Image (tube, rainbow, N blue to C red):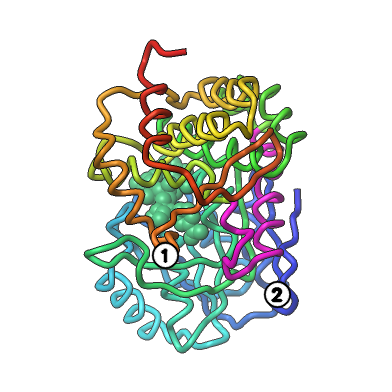
Amino acid sequence: MNVTVSLGSRSYAIVVESGALGSVGGRLRALGVGARAALVSDAAIMRLYGKTVADGLEAAGFAVTLVEVPEGEAAKRLDVAAQCWDALLAAGLDRTSTVLALGGGAVGDLAGFVSATYMRGTNFVQLPTTVLAQVDASIGGKTAIDHPKAKNLIGAFHQPRLVVCDPTTTLTLPPREFSSGLAEIVKHGIVLDAEYFGEVERDAAALLARELPVLERVIGGSCRLKAGVVERDEQEAELRAVLNYGHTIGHALEAASGYARFAHGEAVALGIAAEARLARRLGLASEETVGRQERLLEAVGLPVRIDAVDVEALLAAITRDKKARDGHVPFVLAPRIGAFRLVYDVSPDDIRAVMAELRPGRG
Ligand SMILES: NC(=O)c1ccc[n+]([C@@H]2O[C@H](COP(=O)([O-])OP(=O)(O)OC[C@H]3O[C@@H](n4cnc5c(N)ncnc54)[C@H](O)[C@@H]3O)[C@@H](O)[C@H]2O)c1
Ligand SMILES: [Zn+2]
């Protein structure tokens, strides 16, 4: 499946196809970029998929430099970015050259930041290998490194020239990492597309079993939805906030638990369950709308019940949310499947009440 992200002169294609990693060289050649390329990845991913990409690039005539970075969030640091700049300079990359990110969202965010800043911007290609990176992080041009005091604080918008998602790469993900990425897929369905949500409901078991045709269709559908949002709101003015569904409470759960207790998608699943219940509590959504969201999350291996949350710490984390405006944190709520609404007047008592509903054993 091919999805186009239409952004005028910054438009690009997202290719979603099993085996597509082998075709990256030819696709990049077709964009008419310079002959030098740097492939940025961590050691494990380089071992799994680096050769396929590098061989293809070389066969297409590129001079390829491999740049290895630490795994996961540890890649998103200024000293790692500086090492990448050094490697690019040593290999003679210039503004016509291309930086390719092969890996999860962390490698993509770092390599995108390096590409955005090296010589004021080189060509950039995303080769995402986690579900989260394929349906979310690789699309939209947000790049960043972390600051010791806050995640993603230092960054730039820098759209890729090409995104290649090869669903076969997700077969090597640990189960928890795989399911975690599915939370973003469920999120896209809930707030953007009822028909897509219905397809994911129908295919949930096959998706969890990682059947390739289903993976390809579901990941492709989710890329299409995220691309549509990015097209309508490239720089995150208003509409892009819809992608924050489940994340206001999800991020706060992560922050209040020191980022150790939950995988990101687990926190988002709990955030969706809580925010679904907020919509019902405020009289916007039906019980059935809440139930469908929770059932699908559970069907793809994600939690919707939680005990022992420090709700006051959670509330404090919500008010520190960087999306807060004048002390009000906007909530994206789903009045029904396939629709959303921004709500500004959620009270702390509403949040206390829905978190109490999420305790195991409750309805
Ligand atoms: N730029 C954006 O719009 C955006 C959106 C969402 C998230 N993010 C960022 O994405 C990051 C999280 O990304 P993530 O969830 O992909 O995690 P990750 O990048 O931290 O990767 C998690 C782990 O999975 C491993 N891995 C990756 N692909 C694999 C594969 N195919 N098989 C086996 N192991 C594999 C990695 O080596 C790593 O150890 C965060 O830093 C977050 O801030 C960015
Ligand atoms: Zn997320």
Whether residue 50 appears in this view of the structure is no
Q: Which residues are magenta?
A: 215-242
SS label for mark 2: loop
Q: Amino acid at mark 1?
A: Asp
Q: Which residue is mark 2?
A: 31
Q: How many numbered circles are shown?
A: 2
Residue 102 or residue 134, whichever sits in front = 134
Residue 250, by quadrant, is top left
Q: Residue 354 placed where, x, y %?
A: 43, 29
Q: Is residue 237 magenta?
A: yes
Q: Residues within 10 Å of mark 1 (few under 14, many from 20)?
A: few
Measured from the top left, where is residue 56 in percent x and y?
59, 61
On screen, residue 93 versus residue 62, left or right, reads left
Three-letter code, disc 2: Leu
The correct choice, above or below, for 169 with respect to 7 in the image is above
**Disc 1 target residue:** 326
Q: Is residue 333 above or below residue 160?
A: above
Ligand 1 within 8 angstroms of badge 2 C-beta: no
Residue visible at 59% across and 35% down in the picture? 186
